[in-house]
Image (cartoon, grey):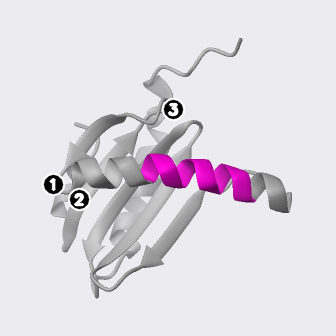
Amino acid sequence: MRLDPLRAVPGVVASALVGPDGLFIELIGEAGDALAAELAALRVVLDRVGRRLGAGNVTRVAFTSERVEVVAVTSGDFVLGVALTRGHDTRAAQQLLARLALELTDLPRPEVA
């Protein structure tokens, strides 16, 4: 499974890979399905923000809540994200996500009409 390397990162609560249709391709953790749904929604917002600001594609986002640290990266139409227990260093997860994003070249891309 593509997300398996994230299992070894300390503090990981959930991880998800979301496709261009907004549906998950792979999940890790009990909260993986919730993370996938939020990543799909977040992708729509990030696309809009990038477009409205003229900033181009948003390729990485990170935020901290009361309980978790979330990092997400995009690769084409796909989003990979991980939620870690707050206070854990996110650098290892960020590096893994970036590497995994580069490996998504074999996934089917949506057809452009």
- Is 53 placed left or right of 71 in the picture? right
Neighbour class for label 3 at 10 Å: few (<14), some, many (≥20)?
some
Mark positioned earlier in the residue sequence (2 or 3): 2
Residue 99 visible in image: no
Residue 20's disc is 3
Residue 83 at x, y percent in the picture: 30, 66
Circle 2/circle 3 CB separation < 8 Å: no
Q: Quadrant of residue 31?
A: bottom left
Residue type at mark 1?
A: Gly
Is residue 43 one of those drawn in magenta?
A: yes
Q: Nearer the viewer, residue 24 or 73?
A: 24
Measured in 3D between alpha carbons, the distance from the residue under mark 2 to the one under mark 3, in whole angstroms, is: 20 Å
Kindly report the secondary structure that dominates the magenta region of the rendered protein.
helix
Residue bearing the label numbered 2: 14
Q: Is residue 23 above or below residue 52?
A: above
Q: Residue at x 44, y 24 (%)?
A: 107
Measured in 3D between alpha carbons, the distance from the residue under mark 1 to the one under mark 3, in whole angstroms, is: 21 Å
- Is 59 placed left or right of 48 in the picture? left
| Mark 2: secondary structure | strand
Q: Residue at x 27, y 82 (%)?
A: 67
Residue bearing the label numbered 1: 29
Q: Quadrant of residue 1?
A: top left
Residue type at mark 3?
A: Pro
Residue 35 at x, y percent in the picture: 32, 55
Residue type at mark 2?
A: Ala
Circle 1/circle 2 CB separation < 8 Å: yes
Mark positioned earlier in the residue sequence (1 or 3): 3
Residue 65 at x, y percent in the picture: 37, 81
| Mark 1: secondary structure | loop
Q: Residue furthest top?
A: 113
Which stretch is magenta? 39-49
